[in-house]
Image (spheres, rainbow, N blue to C red):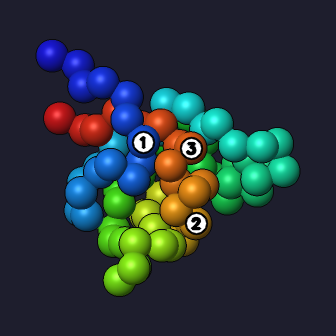
Amino acid sequence: MSQLPQPLTSLEAGRRATVTEIKLAPTERSRLLEMGLLVGTAVELVRFAPLGDPVEIKVRGYHLTLRKHEAEQITVVPAA
């Protein structure tokens, strides 16, 4: 059974997923695309900062830190 898409921030730390949609403004979106965060890319949620913002993910072998409001606009499907 296939998992339903959900915001990146709903994953637990250590969980892997695949990006299905990025709903950010063009300026923010292009910055993420340049860093390799594309639809279809596998990501792993590494951790949340102590107060929940920012969010650290692992994408294409490196760690990327996103603001929580950005991560909430990235839709993923968790890996089985």
Q: Secondary structure at mark 2?
A: loop
Q: Pointer 2: residues within 10 angstroms few (<14), some, or many (20+)?
A: few
Q: Quadrant of residue 47?
A: bottom left
**Residue 73 — which label?**
3
Q: As shown in the figure, which amino acid type bears the numbered disc 3?
A: Gln
Q: Secondary structure at mark 1?
A: strand
64 relative to 30, above or below: below
Q: Pointer 1: residues within 10 angstroms few (<14), some, or many (20+)?
A: some
Instruction: Please indicate, yes or no, whether residue 47 appears anywhere in the rendered image.
Output: yes
**Could you tell whether 67 is left or right of 14 in the image?**
right
- The disc, 1 or 2, on the residue closer to the chain's N-terminal end is 1
Residue placed furthest toward the front: 51
**Residue 78 — which label?**
none
Residue that badge 2 annotates: 67
Residue that badge 1 annotates: 7
Residue 70: x and y in percent read: 60, 55
In front here: 80 or 76? Answer: 76
Seen at 37% across and 28% down, the residue is: 5
Distance, label 2 to label 3, CA atoms, is 10 Å
44 relative to 80, above or below: below
- The disc, 3 or 1, on the residue closer to the chain's N-terminal end is 1
Q: As shown in the figure, which amino acid type bears the numbered disc 1?
A: Pro
Q: As shown in the figure, which amino acid type bears the numbered disc 2?
A: Arg
68 relative to 76, above or below: below
